[in-house]
Amino acid sequence: MSFVKEWIYRLRHNRGFGVQSPVAFHFVMHVLREYKHPYYCYPALNKMAREAGGYPAAHCRRLFRICNYARPRNIVAFADTGGSALAALSAGYSGVPRCSVGSVGELVKFLDSVDAVGLLHIGRTPHYEQVLHRALANVDNRSVIIVEGIHRDKKIVRWWKSVVAHPRVVISMDIYSAGILFFDTEYKKQHYTFWFK
């Protein structure tokens, strides 16, 4: 994507324009976007991101805010390079079962031990299709799934489009670096596209 196209895309999609749902608009403006007044744990998250690698500090802070918003019953990170995703998510909401898994078998074991997915973070893995397929069998209205790297190649872009159309997915958000899925059936099915680096 050229610089000009990237700038236009970002201008149109990073401030909540076109978001009709008040809930989705609140999520964009107060969770995905950076707060003017930083959280107490931002310095620790920035340091952790530098040391662990894996994800930039801005993305780790975004993961923290998503978890803080979702207040999940459990947190699981699949293919978490350097452990930065689980650390960021856990900083947002501690005191719940959480783990990092590296294989589909480990994920299945974790999902069998809980009632439903709380917050599942899927890192950059070749097993993204298997992981999401298994996780969708364990979602409920409160579940949130984050999928990293949904634009990294044409195959995953096509797969992501099929995920957005999946009947279990109610609200989907493409923030370019990742995709976010919600399953609350109180809302109408909707897909949003934003640009957040």
Image (cartoon, grey):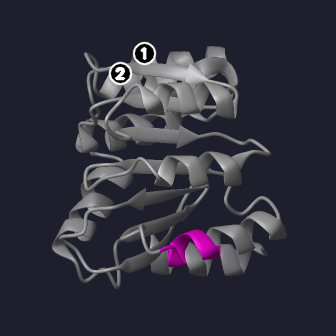
Q: Quadrant location of residue 75? A: top left
Left or right: where does residue 49 sit relative to residue 28? right
Residue 126 x/y as whole percent: 80, 45
Front residue of 185 and 24: 185
Residue 44 x/y as whole percent: 42, 15
Up the image or down, 125 lies above or below 90; here it is below
The C terminus - image quarter: bottom right
Which disc is residue 91 wearing? 2
Front residue of 194 and 160: 160
Up the image or down, 119 lies above or below 46; here it is below
Up the image or down, 111 lies above or below 149; here it is above
Q: Secondary structure under badge 2?
A: helix
Q: Secondary structure under badge 1?
A: helix
Q: Main secondary structure of the magenta part?
A: helix
- Residue at the spot 34% in from the left edge and 29% down from the top edge: 74
The N terminus - image quarter: bottom right
Left or right: where does residue 151 sit relative to residue 92? right
Asked whether residue 185 is in view, the answer is yes
Residue 127 x/y as whole percent: 74, 45
Part of the protein shown in magenta:
161-166
Front residue of 38 and 118: 118
Q: In the rendered structure, which amino acid carries the disc numbered 1? A: Ala
Is 165 contained in the magenta span? yes
Q: Residue furthest front?
A: 112
- Residue at the spot 46% in from the left edge and 49% down from the top edge: 145
Q: Are marks 1 and 2 in contact (CB under 8 Å)?
A: yes
Q: Quadrant location of residue 22? A: bottom left
Is 51 contained in the magenta span? no
Identify the residue position indicated by label 1 in the image: 44
Asked whether residue 33 is in view, the answer is no
